[in-house]
Image (cartoon, coloured by chain):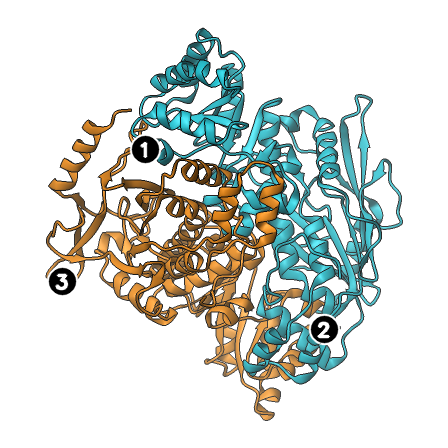
Chain colours: A cyan, B orange
Amino acid sequence: MPTPTTPPVSALTTDLYELNMVQAYLDKGETGEAVFEFFVRRLPARRGFLLAAGLEDALDYIETLRFTSEEIDWLKSTGRFRDNFLAYLKDFRFTGDVHAIPEGSVCFPNEPLIRITAPLPQAQLVESRLINILHFQTLIASKAARMVLAAPGKILSDFGLRTAHGAEAGLYSARASYIAGFSGAANVVAGQRYGIPVMGTMAHSYIQVHDDELTAFETFARARPNDVIFLIDTYDTEAGARKVVELSARLKADGIVIRGVRIDSGDLIASARKVRGILNAGGLKDVIILVSGGINEDVLQGMMTERAPIDGFGIGVNLDASIDAPSLDCAYKLQEYKGTPKRKLSEGKQTWPGRKQVWRSYGADGRMSGDALSVEGDPQAGEPLIEQVMRGGERIKPAPTLAQIRERAARDLARLPEPLRQLQPGNDYPVKVADKLVALAKEADARTRR
Amino acid sequence: MPTPTTPPVSALTTDLYELNMVQAYLDKGETGEAVFEFFVRRLPARRGFLLAAGLEDALDYIETLRFTSEEIDWLKSTGRFRDNFLAYLKDFRFTGDVHAIPEGSVCFPNEPLIRITAPLPQAQLVESRLINILHFQTLIASKAARMVLAAPGKILSDFGLRTAHGAEAGLYSARASYIAGFSGAANVVAGQRYGIPVMGTMAHSYIQVHDDELTAFETFARARPNDVIFLIDTYDTEAGARKVVELSARLKADGIVIRGVRIDSGDLIASARKVRGILNAGGLKDVIILVSGGINEDVLQGMMTERAPIDGFGIGVNLDASIDAPSLDCAYKLQEYKGTPKRKLSEGKQTWPGRKQVWRSYGADGRMSGDALSVEGDPQAGEPLIEQVMRGGERIKPAPTLAQIRERAARDLARLPEPLRQLQPGNDYPVKVADKLVALAKEADARTRR
């Protein structure tokens, strides 16, 4: 069993109905090959695209999913399940195939991020946690990509652990935003677990425990000589900047270089301008200015427009909770069972049946010009996006590194059509449904006996 | 070491700046007694109160926080830390005191949910994860409480795992919403870990894999005879309801009772009325109707006003991601160091210094009439809310059961003033700042040397 990079979570992190259905399937021997696909139904307001993320963690989950005897005993103790089901869980191994759009790809509604092809109980059992991983990381990567596009060339760091929705949200946010182009994160475990650059300064409390701010700065610089960033707004931001200038000569004499200052309150643009002036006048042109507090993509764009002298941004809950759109409307749907394409007809929730492929075309300028959604094996113009990543329950090739995933994201973001690079996207990206898929949907409707 | 009920997360689930500061404190021997308090700064729009949650998980975290040799080796490998710091982590045990407002209490901005009194490096080290736990559970309990108030007497179940922000968010949402008065959750691990009633039905895919809907219903009922709830909207909701009637006699003959039906799409109120009519006409007056999809407190209130014949609600992402307000503006602030009260002066972020107590008064009708925020040891009218829960790093008394916490929440919600029970609160609840606390703030300002 490979070592998962995903933090271990209980195999019981699933919805009861998955277990109910598996019990019923086992009772009836309903274990034919099922095909499920996960996709986003529509974009949130003001969003023009998605950035796919979470796949490698999802594959780790599928590959390593096991039920402990403690978990099985607990399920037995509820009196809800029969022995055939409990025995099935005891020996559970995912043995199916997985196809997916690679992590770091730009993608759009109705395009399957992942396809699971497996005996029905297996494909059903992984649903809840699979969505839980892919939904959240794609949500955050898509949000982070907007920030990256709004502030090209700036240092962006994920500071959001504290108000992320739990520990895993903090970790996954760091991963997803790094894929989208962030420089790093404050969350230490993101460094240990994923090799993401870890960034950090000091809190206001650090200044406050010292008798005065200057002493606080100096003590910190001597304790952390290779990573000196001072938080200068605890009392008076401009006075704080002047103390940094005062201190710099003394530290320089001891070989300690001040890397930057951070401002966390007030009018950030006005403060940054005053602080830049004070630092420059004091000969500290190389000392960078970081800001934090209330940063989102609109604030970033505003600061870029204003040419605020800010080098980097610590971004908290606007990133980690994707405040303007804290969820994506998404679904994991049965598309085929025992060779027959299936389609859900519930009001307003119709889906495209069958195993699908996504084809992407590019214009002469190298920018994306349109996608086509087809049934698998029905070639369209452009490059196919979905590739097989797992066969018989095992990865086909080694997982890409996070650096490789991040490169793919950078490449794809650079190829976005100009209107989609705006915070208020100018138009919808065309995703055409190929003729054979339209025909397949009609066939599925006609076949449904209800 | 007690067994934590919190899922194990890495001790490196913290922000780098905490470690930076601890390194600096250890270098200078700055290990005096520090007092930090965690509080919410202001309420989100349309919110009138908070419901405190997460305390017992937070105490588990504090009590069991240890650094593994693997984690320490990794920190060492970064080259950022010195041996004194690594040795400190190796032997780390929290030895401080904790005071808190009990879980399940209604509370308001500026009222400390928790107070940590400990040697400075300890009190600093626990900051990020402590906020991460308390912020999220309080966020969700406060959201869930609005739903509970909007739909008295209805079955409310947390269906939100899949689009919760990671596995822990799904688990904590189940816990926090159960505290607020939800009936249960779909997330199985919430049952195993916290003893929360687990609820579940079936997915549309279950219906689709069968040749027809009636066969799907019957198979399910025979596999799960004690928990029969049919999802009836896969193809045509009214037709689905008629099949339930058709099936009921056959199942009854075998001693299987249909408990309910679920509708997950379309106009839920209109569908529920039609379905209720069909079920009643078929003699199934006792079969309950559950609905899911897009439910929030406003929808609930609308359905109550319309007297929709709906018995229960599965609530997903509106709960688990607290969609209308996915975060609370909150802070963990140094209030005292080595016996001297401290206060942050950053623009717009001033805090009340010192160790505080909250006093709550009630009117003749038994409803809450106002709170007072005071320094500890300055009695005000009313009952004190903050109590000591940990001494020298150990719990003073056994943790309350989840049932007890839930009872407290029910009691407090029943005592809310009427305007605060509305979804659009009619007025602000009065939280008075006692004279001595105002004076202490002025003293702290005057003392600050900056």
- Quadrant of residue A334 within the rendered picture: bottom right
Assign a secondary structure to mark 3. loop
State which chain disc 2 sits on: B
- Whole-Å distance between the Cαs marked 1 and 2? 69 Å
Disc 1 marks which residue?
A: A208
Number of marks present in the image shown = 3
Q: Say if mark 3 contacts mark 2, CB within 8 Å.
A: no
Disc 2 marks which residue?
A: B212
State which chain disc 3 sits on: B
Q: Is residue B214 visible?
A: no
Q: Is residue A403 left or right of residue B79?
A: right
Please check whether the numbered discs 3 and 2 fall on a single chain: yes
| Sequence-earlier tag: 3 or 2 | 2
- Whole-Å distance between the Cαs marked 3 and 1? 45 Å
Disc 3 marks which residue?
A: B365
Q: Is residue A338 left or right of residue B382?
A: right
